[in-house]
Amino acid sequence: MIKFFREFRQNSLMENKTGKYLKYAIGEIVLVVIGILIALSINNWNDNRKDRISERKLLDNIHRDFVQNKVGFDSLKAIHYRALDGLNKLVDLFPLNTDSLKYEAYKEYNLNIKGMTYDPYSSSIESVVNSNAIQLIQDENLQKYLVSWKDVFHDYKEDENV
């Protein structure tokens, strides 16, 4: 095939058919440009496909963390409700005498009150934000929420400590 085009080009130049040669040259340039554009299009499509696969993996990891966080939060919430119930029972026992049955109940309820805090998983979110993989996520609102997650968590911790 290459030999055919070479012979065509040489014959056109030798026979002084410049117009025919220019048409051939322009056609060849157009074919090369079209080939390059097709290759770029395929490359962009493939890159986009890989980005969507990476985005899905990131979102799956973040979702898994939030599911675990919800389970942890619900169990801690139940513990806090039990502690609140114990505190209410303690308040009902006042005033106390050290030799009364109320004092024994006070000691028992006081053991049930626990000061646990909520510590959610955030490793997936932090790795996404720190590695700049946040750009893979197409939803801009989700990007904003994920970037602000650390600040929201710190605000929650401050409220919890108070």
Image (cartoon, helix red, strand yellow):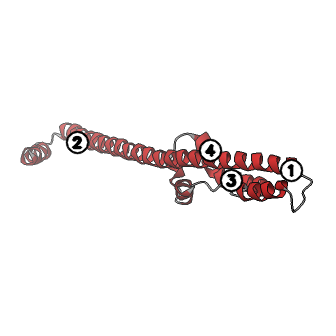
Q: Find disc 4 in the rendering and name its residue.
A: 74
Is the residue under label 2 in contact with that under label 3 (CB below 8 Å)? no
Residue 35 horizontal side relative to residue 82, left or right = left
Q: Nearer the viewer, residue 154 or 71?
A: 71
Q: Find disc 2 in the rendering and name its residue.
A: 28
Give the mark nearest the N terminus, 4 or 2. Answer: 2
Residue 119 horizontal side relative to residue 138, left or right = right
**Amino acid type, residue under disc 3 in the picture:** Phe
Residue 113 horizontal side relative to residue 24, left or right = right
Give the mark nearest the N terminus, 2 or 1. Answer: 2
- When asked about the image quadrant of residue 70, the answer is top right
Mark nearer the viewer, 3 or 2: 3
Mark nearer the viewer, 4 or 2: 4
Give the mark nearest the N terminus, 3 or 2. Answer: 2
Q: Find disc 3 in the rendering and name its residue.
A: 153
Image point 30% across, 43% down: which residue? Answer: 33
Q: Where 7 falls versus 121 (above or below)? A: above
> Helix, strand or loop at disc 2?
helix
Q: Find disc 1 in the rendering and name its residue.
A: 93
Give the mark nearest the N terminus, 3 or 4. Answer: 4
Q: Where 12 falls versus 122 (above or below)? A: above
**Amino acid type, residue under disc 4 in the picture:** Asp
Q: CA distance from mark 3 to mark 2?
A: 62 Å
Residue 156: x, y in percent?
73, 52
